[in-house]
Amino acid sequence: MRRVIFLLFYCSMLISGHAATTGWQTAKHLKAELVSEYQQVTPGQTVRLALHFVPDEHWHTYWQNPGDSGLATSLSWQLPEGVTAGDIQWPTPHAIAIPPLVNYGFEGNTVLLSDLSIAADYASDTIDIQLQADWLVCEEICIPAEAQFSLTLSVASNALLADEQSALFRQAQQQLPQPLNISGQFDTSGGAFSAVIDWQQPTDITVFFVAATELVDHAAKQQISQQGTQLLLQQPLNTYFSGVDDQIELVLVSADTAYSVQLTKSRQTAAEILVTEGQQSSTALWLILLMAAAGGLILNLMPCVFPVLSLKALSIAANSTQQAQQKRDALFYSAGVVLSFVTLALLLIMLRAAGAAIGWGFQLQSPYMVALLVYLLFALGLSLSGVVQFGLGLMNTGGALTAAKGGKGSFFTGVLAVVVASPCTAPFMGSALGYAVTQSAPVALLVFAALGLGMALPFLLLAFVPGFARLLPKPGAWMDTLKQVLAYPLYLSAVWLLWVYGRQAGVDAQALLLIGLVCVAAACWLWGRKQLAQAGRVGAGFALLLVLLALVLPVLAPKQAAPQVQSSDTQHWQPWSAATLKQLREQGKPVLVNMTADWCITCLVNERMALNTDSSKAALALYDVTYLKGDWTLRDSAITEYLRLYQRDGVPLYVLYWPGQPPQVLPQILTPDTLPQTLARLSSQP
Amino acid sequence: MKLRHLVLTASAALLSLGLSAAPQVGTAAPDFTVVDTKGNSHSLKDFAGKNVVLEWTNHDCPFVVKHYSGNMQALQSDLTGQDVVWLTVISSAPGKQGHVSPAKADELTASRDAAPTAVVFDESGVVGKAYDAKTTPHMYVIDKAGVLQYMGGIDSIPSAKVDDISKATPLFANAAKAVLAGGKPDPAVTKPYGCSIKY
C-alpha cells in the first residue's frame, strides 16, 4: 500500500519537473534515500544534498571515527562536469558502548549532508547525480551494504526549494555540531591525548568526540576541566595509535548544544598539556574560598606552624580572665594572619608579573632568611624558658616590637605564624593556590585572605564562642610550667632550620650560625639581666652589639657550590630532571616523581612514613617504577616550572606516571598505603 | 573474618589484573592458555622457538567473510607451511553472536577449507582483553622469542568488499614476512577494522 502511494507521489513529482528525492531504497535493517534541498537549481548555486538513513530500532551506522570497530559511511559521487560535491557534514555522534568497546555512531533518523556546488557557467538544463553509498549497519551483528542513488535536478535561472523536504533539512541542521572559530591545540605525549582550547563560553562540556581514528582509547574515561578561559581535555591514547595529522576535528557536547572545533598539533613538545585530577570542572569561587579557608585551618596542624600555635594558645590562656582583651587579641591575631597572607599574595603576584620563577615557600629558600628564622625561634625559646622577657606579649618579632602588648603583639604573632607556615602547603592549599595563581589579582587576594581567615579561625572561636572558651583550663601556676615546656618545640624548630641551613650553606656556615646563636643567647641573657635591673646600660649596649654580630655572621659565611650528593648505593631514587622524566616516559616506564625540600617538614614526614617504607619500596620494585626525586631546597627554576605544570606553587608534590594513563597527582599527605594502593589501581586499569 | 578474606581476595584479583597492562609491540606477548576444538590445551610458552600468529574471528562477521573468500585461507596455508603456529581465536561469549560449539568450529574450518594450526576458544574474553583485541578479524604476530611484533588490521582498506583485498596493502602478510625473515615489521601497529568482538 505504502509503495503504491509512494509511486503515485513519485509520478506526480515527475509531472511537475524533477523530484527532489530518489525515494527509499530498502536494505537489511535500514532504508535510505537521497534528497535535495532544492527541486530546481541555478548555476553558481550551492545546494545541500541529504543522504537520509532510517535504521531499524537499536541499529546504528557509524561516524567518521567509528570507534573501536565498525566502519564510517562513505560516499562516492559521479557528477557532470562543473558540479562538485563536498565532504559529508557529520551530525553530532553518540557513544555506543558494547563493553569493553565503544563505538561512535547514529541511531534513528540520520541525515548526512553534503554540499553540491554548481559552477556559474554550468550550461546544461539538468544535473544527473549518481551516488554510491557504502555503509555498515550494526546492532549486535553487522551488515555491510551499498546502494546506488540517482537523482536529476533541473537547472533554471531561478532556484526552487523543495518545500516538502524543508523539515528534513531543518532537522539535519539541528543535528550538526556548531562550528566554532576558536583556537585549540592538542598533544599526544605521555600516553594521553591532551587538548587545550580557548573557551570563553560558560558552557559545561560533558563529553567530547575526536574525529581522528585510533587516537584516543574510546572506552577510557575522559577528563574535562575548565580553568579560567581554557578548556582542558584528556583521554588515554589508543593501543593502536600510530600517528595523527597536524589538524584534527573535535566535537564538544554540552547538555543542549554541540560544537565542532579544529585542533592543531602542539609544536612545543616540552610544554605538555595537563589536566590534573581533582580539578575536573570549573569550581565556583565560593567553593574555592571555602577550600582555602579549610586549608588555612589545617595549616594549624602542620608541624611547622605548631610551635607558634602553642604560643598563641598560651597567650590566649594567659588572658582568659579578660574577655574583652581576648576578643581584641584574637581579632588582632586574625588581622595579622590575613594581612600577611594578602601581603604574600601581593608579593607573589608582583614577582610573577616580573617574570621571576619563584614559588611558594621561597622565604626559606634564601639561607639568610633561614638564619634569621633560627635566631628568631631560638630567642623566642629563650624567652619562654625565662631567660628574657619579651614584654608581656609572648610573641614579638624584634626589638622594636618587644614592648608591644596585647594588640600589637597579637598582630605580629599572626604575622610570624604565616611566615613559618608558608613552606608547608597543606592539602586544599595547593589547589587554592594553583587556582589563585591563574586568576586575576583581586580573586587571588581573596583566596589568600580566605586562607588566612581559616588559619585564624580557631583563635576567633576561642575568643568569641563562649563554649570554646569554657573548654580552656583556669589560669594558674601550671601556665608558667606550660610556657617553659613550650620552649622545647621552638628549640626543635630552630634545630630543624639549622639543619636546613647546613644543607643549604654547608657545615662551615652552619658553625658560624651556631656562633651567632651563642651571641643571641648571650644578648638575651644580658637583656634579661637588664630587665631584672641587674645590669646597666653597658650590658644593654653589649647585648645590642652581640645581636648585630649574630646578624652579620651568616653574611660572612663561605658560599658552598652545591649541596653534597648522597651516596647512591642505598637510595632507591634518582635525582629528578625534566630530561630523565621525559626519557623514561617515552620508554613507557612507570615513574614516581617526588618534589621535596629540606625545609618542608610535611615532605620529610611523608618520605619517612610513606615512601621510604619497605612496603612502598616493594611496590616500586614490583611495578618496576622509577622513583625520581627533585630537591627544591635551593630555588630551582626547572622544578618551579614543573610545579606550575600541576598548578602548584609549593612542595610537596607527588606525581605518578603510569604508561597509557594521565599523570596521577597523589595527595599531599601520604599514608603508608597510598603508593602501593595507587599502583595496584593504576595497573589494573586496562 | 569474612571481610578480611574478601579484602584479601579483592587485592589478589587487583594484583593479578595489574599484571595485564595493554600489549606493546617489542615486549613479551601476554601468555595465555586456551583449549582448542579437539580439547587440547595450548599455551603461548609451548610455542617457544616458533613464530605464532593469532587471528581473532567470528564466522558471521562480514569482514571475516570478506577475507575467508580465499585470502585468509591462503595466508594460513602459506604461513603454517613455513612452520608458523596459527591460532584462530574465538572470543565470543556463550550466548553471544559468533559463539560456536567445537563441532561447529571444525565444520567451519572444513567447509571453508581453512588451514589454521588450531581453532581455540576464549569464552571468558581473558585472552582477547589481554591483547586488547577489538575487532574481527584482528591479527597479531609473535616471534620465536615470544615478543609481540605486530598487532592490528589484516590490510589497509577497511571495508567489507572482497574487491578491496587486491587493492589494499597487505599489512599483516607483510608483517609476517618480515618476522619470518628475522626482521621487524613496519608498520608494527595498524588500525584493526571489522566487527566488534562479542565479549
Image (tube, coloured by chain):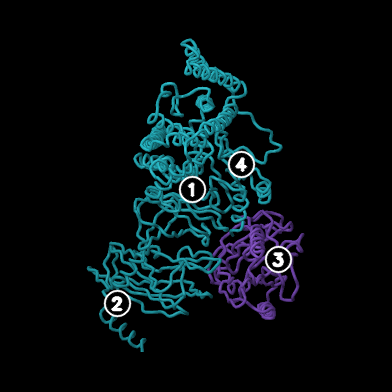
Chain colours: A cyan, B purple
Q: Nearer the viewer, residue A487 or A88?
A: A487
Image quadrant assignment for residue A563? top right
Which residue is outermost to the left?
A158
**Amino acid at dot 1:** Leu
**Amino acid at dot 3:** Leu
Q: In the figure, A397 relative to A127: above or below?
A: above
Whether residue B8 is visible here, answered yes or no, is yes
* Numbered marks: total: 4
Q: In the figure, A683 relative to A558: above or below?
A: below
Question: Percent position (x, y) of residue A383?
Answer: 51, 25
Q: Residues within 10 Å of mark 1 (few under 14, many from 20)?
A: many
- First in sequence, mark 2 or 1: give its number: 2
* Foreground: disc 4 or disc 2: 4
Q: Is residue A481 left or right of residue A185?
A: right
Question: Percent position (x, y) of residue A77?
Answer: 41, 68
Q: Looking at the rendered structure, which numbered label has been put on residue A607?
A: 4
Q: Residue at x 50, y 36 (%)?
A: A310
Q: Which residue is mark 3?
A: B79
Q: Residues within 10 Å of mark 4 (few under 14, many from 20)?
A: some
Rounded to the nearest angstrom, the CA distance separating label 2 from label 1 is: 56 Å
Q: Which residue is mark 2?
A: A18
Q: Looking at the rendered structure, which numbered label has been put on residue A274?
A: 1
Residues at marks 4 and 1, common chain? Answer: yes
Q: Nearer the viewer, residue A397 or A372?
A: A397
| 4 and 3 marks in contact (CB < 8 Å) | no
Q: Chain of mark 2?
A: A
Whether residue A378 is visible here, answered yes or no, is no
Q: Chain of mark 4?
A: A
Q: In the figure, A104 relative to A647: above or below?
A: below
